[in-house]
Image (tube, helix red, strand yellow):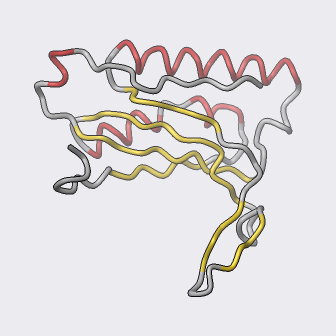
Amino acid sequence: MGHFCFKGVKTINHLKSKKMKEFMLLIRTQGDHLAELSPEQQQQHLKKVMTYMGGLMQSGKLNSAQPLDMEGVIISGAAGKLKDGPFNETKEVIAGYFLVQANSLEEAIQIAKENPVFEDGTGARIEVRPIKVMEGING
């Protein structure tokens, strides 16, 4: 599967004036959710995702999106110990993210609900989190 990235997509000017907020949509799956799909199903899924992302881009709501590799580590504890993936006992991983703009948490939730990851029966979950605006950090 190829990577797709839409970093730095400019929002449409009339949407900017509404003071939209940023939200992080974290895609959580049980391991590599695409590995269980046939190559044909993977291609169908990719087409659905690209259509979904195209709609978000066209509406000026997509800032960026990326799948994440299954490799990685978690650094935790006072001594900074490393823990190799999978990252917890349930083998749930963050498979990717979408950084979107929305007028409210409810709108961001609706954007997440429309994600095609739910159509393939993979048991995926999406965590929707508002980006906290902090003076001097977020511009």
The location of residue 81, given as percent across then percent down, is 68, 79
Q: Is residue 38 above or below residue 106?
A: above
Q: Is residue 9 above or below residue 108?
A: above
Q: Residue at x 20, y 43 (%)?
A: 139
Q: Is residue 100 above or below residue 85?
A: above
The location of residue 114, given as percent across then percent down, is 48, 30
The location of residue 25, given as percent across then percent down, is 46, 44
Q: Quadrant of residue 27?
A: top right
Q: Is residue 4 left or right of residue 17?
A: right
Q: Residue furthest left?
A: 17
Q: How many marks?
A: 0
Q: Residue at x 72, y 42 (%)?
A: 122
Q: Quadrant of residue 80?
A: bottom right
Q: Residue at x 29, y 43 (%)?
A: 106
Q: Residue furthest bottom?
A: 78
The location of residue 98, given as percent across then percent down, is 48, 37
